[in-house]
Amino acid sequence: MIEKSNILPQEKEIVLEIKNLNKSFADNHVLKNFNMKLYKGENLVIMGKSGSGKSVMIKCLVGLIQADSGIISVMHKDITTLNQTALDILRSDIGFLFQGSALYDSMTVRENLEFPLRRHSSRFEKNMDTNTLVMEALENVGLAHAVDLMPAELSGGMQRRVALARTLILQPKIILYDEPTSGLDPITAKEIIILMQDIQKKYNTSSLIITHDVDCARAISDRMVLLIDGTNYAEGTYDTLSASTDPKVKAFFKH
Amino acid sequence: MSGISNIKSHIQTFLKEIGELSYFTARFFKETFRKPFEFKEFLRQCYSMGNRSLVLVGITGFIIGLVLTLQTRPTLMEFGAVSWMPSMVGISLIREIGPMITALVCAGRIGSGIGAELGSMRVTEQIDAMEVSGTNPFKYLVVTRVLATTFMIPLLVIIGDAIGLYGSYLVEHLKGDVSFQLYFNQVFESLEFGDIIPATIKSFFFGLAIGLVGCFKGYYCGKGTAGVGRAANSAVVFTSLLLFIIDFIAVFAADIFYDL
Amino acid sequence: MNANSQKIRLGLFVIIGTLLFVLGIYLIGQKQNMFKRTFMISAEFQNVNGLQKGNNVRYSGINIGTVRAIEMVNDSIVKVEMNIQENIVKHIRKNAVATIGSDGLVGNMIINILPRDGMAGVIENGDMIKSFSKVEPDDLLSNLSVTIKNTEILTEDLLKITNAINNGQGTLATVLNDTVMSSDLKQTIKTLKEVSVNASNTLLEFNGLVKSIKTDDASILGLLLNDTVSGNKLKMILQTIETSSVKMENSVEKINTIIENVNTSDGAFNYVIKDTSLVNSLKSTLKNVNEGTDKFNQNMEALKHNFLTRGYFRKLNKEERKAKEN
């Protein structure tokens, strides 16, 4: 049903790499020497239990959380060494879909979508109409009719799709999905997954998906990394991992 | 033993809070003078804080003016000094009661509002989303809100004072047949720059405190809805406390400057 | 659309708030004459009775300015600088006098600038005008009137006695022999002395007060006390009272010595009686006393009709009448 990439990852350009990432909160050592690579055009799923540090890891990637140690290179730039301006420029190449959509509830859908454009308008041609961009992004997620509604007036699935549209509006090269299907019913979750695949095809983005949802992982992953005990415990395709005999790995795929 | 360590940890928490708030304040001043300035958001906040608090401040001010006059009247009558009412009400309203009541009401309305709003934005990762999308959320959310309270509170205080004086005038007019002109003539006769200027400066600091504490509590809100509730609640409590401290310092400072 | 109306309402709110603030500032500033062109004049006082910076300055009862600065010049002189509205300056002459008063029973202190008769140039910026420090004239006046009343009663007594002597209803000898009469006389003379000393002290004080405004400044006192009677008249009356009381005192002193002589020296009595010169002297002294008290009475009468004591005497009359009716 889902077309898997046939090209071997190793031959592709690395767009995102984490080496020996460590992060602890007080006495809680969340990430211990975590390593990870994301290749261009790939859908990488990182699976882990709740509280295993997935969200912390992904936030370290965009500089929302300062890592204690380790190298995080995004598009060959180490984000831990960048100043604010350079970080902001780099961030415009990264789309981030937050767990709870994180739509600005005091703004309409249109304003939500316009918001990222405020600072990164230089990426587009000067005569580019923001309205066109907004409508285009909304059409991608099939919500052009909701442009003047407030986020609170939308259902959870619609909110997620608007958030996706907002993530897409800057045409990022890498998209980070933090639990894209969490809190959604299976049908809506499926819609979102299909949307993610469409986008990936359309813009040839590289995606890093964090989830604990096995269905989601199966549907979308080219490759998976299992985050267990703060480190990259196992790596491989869905099929190889689900066939694993390691009890810790097996625990993920049991229903 | 546990009691002592408990106290120690309380003190540590308190000091940490003060330290963080100081850092937050310093960052606020640093970011305020850095481009770009989010003017549109600033205006939006001014509107939502200034205009939307107007009715509340107006009603409180009016009632305070009314009550102050009604309560003082019998005492002043005993001394045959009812004609002193405008001066007395004017000075007490403008110097102390007006700024303080307005600030407290606004701490309840605006401070808790900011705390809850930023808190829920933090909890639902909206602040993170802003940061990721290249907008400095500190500038966009905190600087605009703190500046808005800093400029709106003095205006609200002035309007509250005016409405309070009008309330007081109404009582005097109904009970003592004092004309509008006479009443306000006497009010301004007794007022001096030494009354109105420190009160206004004080109001700016009140506004700053309300905005800063509200933003601080919201911006570093704890997890979940409980965190939002705590942020809103502690914003009001801490702001009110801070208002009294600022008031004390302001009166103290004004006293010293007045003597000079 | 919505954002626009928000902006409009915010603008309205800001403008109203700012306007109220500016209005407040203006109203206070107007009171302190901050936004009008002002003149600065000054006056020196011995005592400013708690006057403060920013207190009002009045001219003929109108607020025309405020106190700008108060400073000690030396150990007994306080210089007060005042800001005066420029448009009122043309009405103030150089000979105007500044006094310190209070605005109502418990009100603020104020400076009253009082115009005076006589020609003088219009005041100029930086001028120093004369001042007058009120030394509780009310106290002084009530004190004086009590003294005067006492004197009146005593002189009446004395008059009876001296008349008796003069009319030869018995000679001085008989008068003096009559122990009752004698002790009476002594007592009266003694009291009279005390009273006249008292009176002259009060008068001295009063005179000093008048003098302090210099000879031609008497009108100020009259003005201060809200009376139309010219101050010069008052001053004359006061002077005469003073001189008469001094004369009286002298005469009383003489009588005293004589009586003292009579009483102390044995046998001296006859001697005294025979000594015609002494008798003459005594006679003339008593005559003096008589004249003195007469004049005193006349002046008292004048005072009665005068401003200071008019109220007092009226009250006295009333009380007397009341007492009679009862």
Image (cartoon, helix red, strand yellow):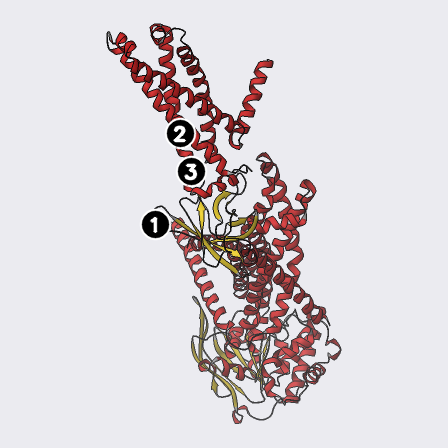
- Residue at 57 percent across and 63 percent down: it is B149
Q: Nearer the viewer, residue C124 or A219?
A: C124
Q: Which mark is residue A212?
A: none
Asked if the residue at tag 2 contacts the one at tag 1, i.e. Cβ–Cβ closer than 8 Å, the answer is no
Residue under label 2? C243
Q: Is residue C214 left or right of residue A75?
A: left
Of labels 3 and 2, earlier in sequence is 3
Q: Nearer the viewer, residue C222 or A63?
A: C222
Query: Residue at point 43% right, 38% down?
Result: C210
| Chain designation of label 2 | C
Pointers 1 and 2 within a single chain: yes
Q: What residue would you read off at disc 1?
A: C74
Which mark is first along the chain, 2 or 1?
Answer: 1
**Which mark's residue is nearer the viewer, 3 or 2?**
2
Quadrant of res A143:
bottom right
Q: Do callouts 1 and 3 mark residues in contact (Cβ within 8 Å)?
A: no
Element on which disc 2 rests: helix
Q: Secondary structure at mark 1?
A: loop
Residue A244, percent across and down? 54, 80
- How far apart are the two marked residues, 1 and 3, measured between alpha carbons? 22 Å
Residue A227, percent from left and from top: 51, 76
Give the residue type that dot 3 points to: Leu
Side of A145 relative to A75 (left or right)? right
The subunit letter for the residue under badge 3 reads C
- Determine whether B216 is above or below A193 in the image: above
Residue receiving disc 3: C209
Q: Secondary structure at mark 3?
A: helix
Q: Amino acid at mark 2?
A: Thr
